[in-house]
Amino acid sequence: MSAATSLADRFEEHRPHVRAVAYRLLGSLSEADDAVQQTWLRLQRVDPDEIDNLGGWLTTVVSRLCLDMLRARRARPEVEIDAHLPDPVVTAPEVHDPEAEAVLADSVGLALQVVLDRLKPAERLAFVLHDMFAVPFEDVAELLGRTPAAVRQLASRARRRVADTPAPERDRARQRAAADAFLTAARAGDFDALVAVLDPDVVLHADGGAARPEISGIVRGPATIAQRALAFRTPGVEVRPVLVNGVAGALATLEGRPVTLFAFTLCGDRIVRLDILGDPDRLAALPLPA
């Protein structure tokens, strides 16, 4: 086996972790893949014998790349809109997908990615690396060019923002029952049944992109959300269950083309958050289960 082949094999062993870090930092599957590829290219330009801890080296490199990408994104505020949803990871229910599971390890759903997208780059890096991937504050401080005490403060500020994110109900059967009840009521035009499955403090976050701006935005309250669900019913649409970032969701298709993706966050038996991606361009680009 050549040295190049050996290095490639070692990188592949770490790829799921590197991609998970990049996805959490960027919230974009395509950008995460770009960061992973750039990390591999940089690895090829160094002497692997000089790397004592390959996993740590890769985490540092991909984090620096992601930090640069986040800072560039912040410099273009026109691409940041309140309605924007990060890329979801969509899998078929009850199907073992090791790559998706690696990306979603310790996930608390798509709602967390939305909050992470609102953080400043340094806050996001400190929180993701330390709280999600157990990188010591000292290492994060070196990466950011700050003191460990300053990085602790960054992570603490991010943690307070994340604390307001609803933790999803872990019982898959309960998730599915509530999601199915919502979708059944929407198809039937049953306003009361829709309201019954929604928490009094429910929030709907919809992203229709440039093609469907009329559905984009944040809506609060069960009655308002129920009315919106009834207003956007479309004849001929087929809906099938999926998992979205590890929680119950649904994919609506029209003549085989994906038109809307739903992700449901529950507290007990009630839906507390509903994330909807209706951007046809982004849906077409996502790796969706067959």
Image (cartoon, rainbow, N blue to C red):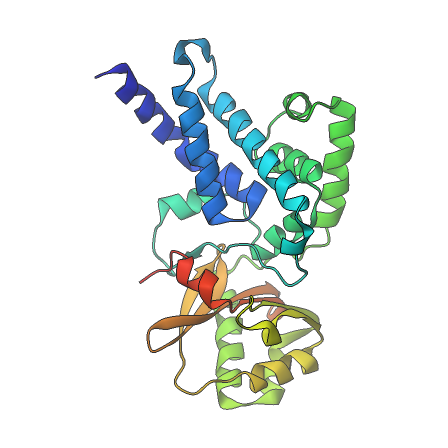
Quarter holding the N terminus is top left
Q: Above or below — where is 73 with respect to 2?
A: below
Residue at position x 66%, y 55% in the image: 78
Place of residue 201 in the rendered image (x, y in percent of width and height, measured from the top left): 72, 70
Taking depth in this image into account, of 267 and 125 the one nearest to the observer is: 125
Taking depth in this image into account, of 38 and 138 the one nearest to the observer is: 38
Residue at position x 54%, y 57% in the image: 170
Place of residue 198 in the rendered image (x, y in percent of width and height, measured from the top left): 64, 75
Q: Above or below — where is 16 with respect to 214?
A: above
Residue at position x 58%, y 39% in the image: 69
Q: Is residue 90 left or right of residue 212?
A: left
Q: Is residue 189 left or right of residue 243?
A: right
How many marks the image carries: the answer is 0
Quarter holding the C terminus is bottom left
Taking depth in this image into account, of 40 and 191 the one nearest to the observer is: 40
Place of residue 145 in the rendered image (x, y in percent of width and height, measured from the top left): 70, 23
Place of residue 272 in the rendered image (x, y in percent of width and height, measured from the top left): 65, 67
Looking at the image, which residue sits at the far top?
50
Q: Is residue 22 visible in the rendered structure shown here?
A: yes
Q: Is residue 173 visible in the rendered structure shown here?
A: no
Image quadrant of residue 265?
Answer: bottom right
Residue at position x 58%, y 51% in the image: 108
